Structure formats: C-alpha cells, structure tokens
Image: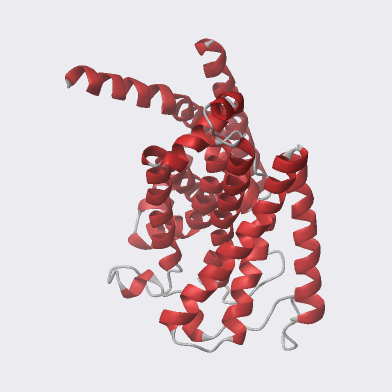
Amino acid sequence: MSTNHSIQIRHLLHTFLPSVIAIIGFFVLCGVTLIIRGQNPWEFYQLILISGFSSIDDIGSILFNSTPLIFTGLAVAIGYKAGLFNIGCEGQLYVAGFAATWIGIHLDLPSFLIIPLCLTAAIFFGGIWGAIPGILKARYGAHEVINTIMMNFIAFAIMSYLVTSVYQDPGQMEPQTAEIHDSAKLPKLAGLIPILPQSNYLNASFLISCVVVFMSYILLKYTRWGYELRLVGNSSDVAAYGGINPGTVTIWVMTLSGAIAGLAGVADVLGYHYRFVHSFSPGWGFTGIAVALMGRNHPFGVFAAAILFGFLSKIALDVELLLDIPHGLFIAGQGLLILGLVCMEGYTKIKNQ
C-alpha cells in the first residue's frame, strides 16, 4: 500500500508541479516588475492577501468570479481528453444563456419547475452548438478548431440580432432583454450561509459547478464512456481496432463539452444580470482554455485553476486603485502566466519522450 501511495504522490507532483512553478514564476515576475517601477513589491503581496482573504465576502466574490470559468474550463478539458480542442465555449455559453433567458421571460412558473427548465434549455442548446462542429469533424474531417471559431462568430451575430432587434427591452438604452421572472432567478447562497453578506452575488450556480466537477471526474475515471473518450484521445486508431467508433465519440464529447460550457451562460443570466445582456461575457470561453491548461485537464485541477483566476480577477481592481498599477499591466502578467504554462507543458512532454 505504501508503494502505491508513493506512486500516486509522484504522479500528482508530476501532473501539477509545472502549473505550480508557473504560478510562482508569475508572482515573482510581478514583484520584479514593481521593483523596476520603483514600487515596494511587499505592498503588492500584502494587498493580494488582504484583498482576497480578509473576509467571507471576499471569498464569496472569488468563488462568484470563478463559477463561469469552472464550466468553461471543464468543457475544454473534457474535449481535450478526447483529442479535441473546443474553442467554441464563448459561442456556446451565449446561445445557452439566451435560451435560458427566453424560458425565464416567457414562462411564469414556480421555481422548482422554471429553474430546471431554464437549465435544460441551456444544456440542450449549448450541446447543439457543440455538436455541430463534432458532426462536421466526424463526417467530413473538418477540423474542430476552425469549426468552433466559426460557430462563435455565428452565435455572436445571431445573439446580437436577437437582443438588439427582436427582444430588446424598450425601457433600456443598453442592448439587453427584459428581466426574467423572479421564480427563475437562482437563489443567492447568502440565504444558506448566514455569515455571507446579502450583497454578495455568490449563488446556486456555484453549487451546480461543484456537482458538474464531481460528475466529470466520475465520468472520466470510472465509466466506460470515460474510458472510450480517453482511448480515442490517446490513439483513435487503437480505439477503432478495439471496436470503438471514434466518430461517435467525437460527436458526443463535443456535445457534452458544449452543454457544460452553456452552463456558464446560465450562471450569468439566472444568477447575476437576471436578463441577457449584450456581450455579457468578458471572455470566459477563451479564459477557460487557460484554466483547463493550468488544471492539467483534470476536473479537480480545473476547479483549483478557476479559483485562482477568480482570485486574480478579484484583486485586479484593488491593485489598480490602491497601488496605481495599470489594469492592462496586470492582465499582461496573466498572459505571461499562460505562456509560462504552455512552456512548462511543452518541457514536460519533451522530458518524458
């Protein structure tokens, strides 16, 4: 048992150590940059601790920021496990978010009915938007990267038309729909956690994301579908020789990936804005790629990476206001963090060859 335990520990270190090194390098680089600017780096390190963890409200805000990234990170990770690169999460979450909004506006039902209907609509349309590139890949060999990018453009155009020309709320200047019914709004967790302020936006979508993380882990680790998914990702020829149809796996994996990405849209329209707002996503679908990369495409790793990015999003404004560090400079640092992750990933692969 001790030998197996040691092997598991070494495997975990081998899997996540590159991400840890890249994160440490990011914060060291931040300190060096501040020294060059003539600022005290210790003030920066103290601020990020105070800003992120000084109260339960701060922690709730980090989890709120992390929730959409958990969904998009998982969507990318599951696709990558099957050898597929889903860059269409942004379009998928927009389509799914609008579908959930439409249900929430037009159906006035009790919460125990309307919320599951909104979630089902989002999962269905997000899945459809993911399935289309999967079908094109399986049937015609069209690369999923090109397909998902094009599906993003199509989704943006259609949603822009709908929200500005068909469902625009006449009482609002900003392109957005009317507000959903109160019964369709996801409850805030402040009602379940007494120490969490009522003003905190952390809501039930975070609990849904936790469930999806565990379900994804079980799927990948313990089910026949997870085995087929991983086998196709490692070698589609071997999978085909073993009686597995790679095309079928490609279609259902892309469908599942799109469905999970769609839940990121639900987190916003049912848990925050309570309506579909034009361009409501700050790029969650694309940031999800970095989250999956940092989490090494492991569900629990994705969860941890999303928390980190939620933390960075939380402190970015405080860093700009209190330390006079330009927001763009901090975002550039995050870009370097992603580059560091890519480099560490490549180094690990070369070393293992």
Choose between 349 and 119: the one closer to the eye: 119
Of residues 144 and 73, the one nearer the viewer is 144
Image check: 169 left or right of 187? right
Decide: is 143 above or below 303. above
Q: Quadrant of residue 144?
A: top right
Q: Is residue 96 left or right of residue 152?
A: left
User: For residue 170, which quarter of the picture?
Assistant: bottom right
Residue at (65% x, 70% y) in the render: 98
- Quadrant location of the C terminus? top right
Image quadrant holding the N terminus, namely top left
| Residue 184 vertical position relative to residue 206 in the rendered view, above or below | below
- Compare residues 211 and 20 and report the one nearer the observer: 211
On the image, which quarter does residue 4 sit in? top left
Above or below 42: residue 32: above
Kindly identify the residue that appears in the image at 61 percent across and 36 percent down.
246
Q: Position of residue 308 (x, y in %)?
A: 46, 44
Q: Is residue 39 visible?
A: no
